Amino acid sequence: MRVAIASGKGGTGKTTVSASLVSVWDGPVTAVDLDVEEPNLHLFLNPVITGRETATLEVPVVDETKCTHCGACADLCQFKAISDLGTVLLTFPEMCHGCGGCMAVCPENALKPGARELGQISWGRAGGAGFLMGRLRVGEAMSPPLMRAVRRRLADMLAVSGGDAVIDAPPGVSCPAVNAVMDSDLVLLVTEPTPFGFYDLKLAHQAFGPMGTPMAVVVNRAGVGSADVYEYCDAVGLAIVAEIPYQRRIAEAYANGQILAQTTAGMQAVFESLTDRIRTLATAEVRHG
Amino acid sequence: LAVRFGHAAFATGTAKEIKMEKIAVSCDEPNLDAPVDARFGRAAGFVIVDPQTMAFEYVDNGASQVMARGAGIQAAEIVARAGAGVVLTGFVGPKAYQALTAAGIKIGQNLESLTVRQAVERYTAGAVQPATQPNRKGHGL
């Protein structure tokens, strides 16, 4: 089972929930940080890194001696990553999405695969759990290609080790967020009962809904704000599967790099109960599906 | 290699040929007395002027305006296809500069306070210094 910890609004507690879930998980589990633009799960899990690799994207390299300037590649490219200017075929590697279409349509075999560095993937162990993360290269504008490379490695790791995966997703509802949750069995939406939390919860619910993956809600900072989040969840049938109270000592634990589930017996119980709810929701869906 | 080839193609032109090169001026209407559009990549279109006769045609650049990225590259393609050897405009970003230079097209920048006609006349009088670098940062990437 793969459970993605997502949110619309940033800073609602995705990493807090992810780290805590991993620490109390009732079986073999791999913790995955897919927030590759600003990974921080490792700050809480303190993994021992045992392997690293550089992820790259295949971009075209022009062989000027073979190019006849027919323009087929430039006509195909939707991102202006390759441009035919009559006597010169120019590539803009940073614009390339790596689809390989230009190389496929070239009748002269004048385009060869080159590479653009996307970032680093590293993996290892965090206590009893597996650990995997991506870190986007500074200056790289597209995170989904790196996220796909991390997810491919996750599939390889799970094929060997078995067990479940807890995925710390990036915030928002655009391509990176969708990419992080798209092949999960359950999406846990972490929110807070503030106007921003409420607004972005609705966006996330609408964005991820069409994928058909079951969703449930964790309310962080319970006690502030209004009842809007609760009323919305009730109205649309989103189960609230855990609440984390709004307390200064929780913020202090976070600031000290502590895993919330390990701070008090009460907090441990919250996340053990959440693990049970996740299993029930994900399995129920498998049965119905 | 690509850029060298572009320069070589340009360098082979004689002074007389260069004088006769068509000039593309960014502008939002087909009118010699309309102001130069400060934007190159996201200009509405280009007035393509024959500097000897001041006859002109207009090519639309509307498709570039709606692109999320790569507008400057697309505009450079449009100008190159129109057969222009010179671009007169306000601001040119790094990718447009790279594409125009590779195509052997000379660039005159910072002309947005002029009309199309004034910009062409200033260029033909030799009073426009060819750009040696982009004068705008790129967007997004």
Image (spheres, rainbow, N blue to C red):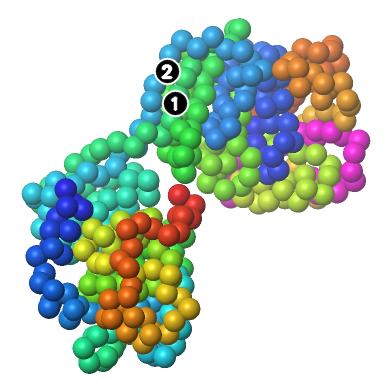
Residue at horizontal 89%, vertical 26%?
A: A247
Which residue is identified by label 1? Answer: A120
Q: Say which residue appears at 87% left-offset and 34% top-offset.
A: A222
Find residue A132 and report its horizontal and vertical position in percent: 51, 20
- The image quarter in which residue B53 lies: bottom left
Residue A189 vertical placement versus B117 (above, below): above
Whether residue A231 is in magenta: the answer is yes
- Asked if residue B121 lies in the magenta stretch, the reply is no
Percent x, y of residue B77: 28, 67
Chain letter of disc 2 in the image: A
The stretch in magenta equals A209-233
Residue B43 visible? The answer is: no
Q: Amino acid at mark 1?
A: Gln
Gap in Å between the C-alphas at discs 1 and 2? 7 Å
Identify the image quadrant of residue B7: bottom left
The residue under label 2 is: A52
Q: Residue at x 43, y 66 (%)?
A: B91
Q: Nearer the viewer, residue A122 or B113?
A: B113
Q: Nearer the viewer, residue B85 or A178?
A: B85
Q: Badge 1, how many Cα within 10 Å: few under 14, some, many 20+?
A: some
Q: How many marks?
A: 2
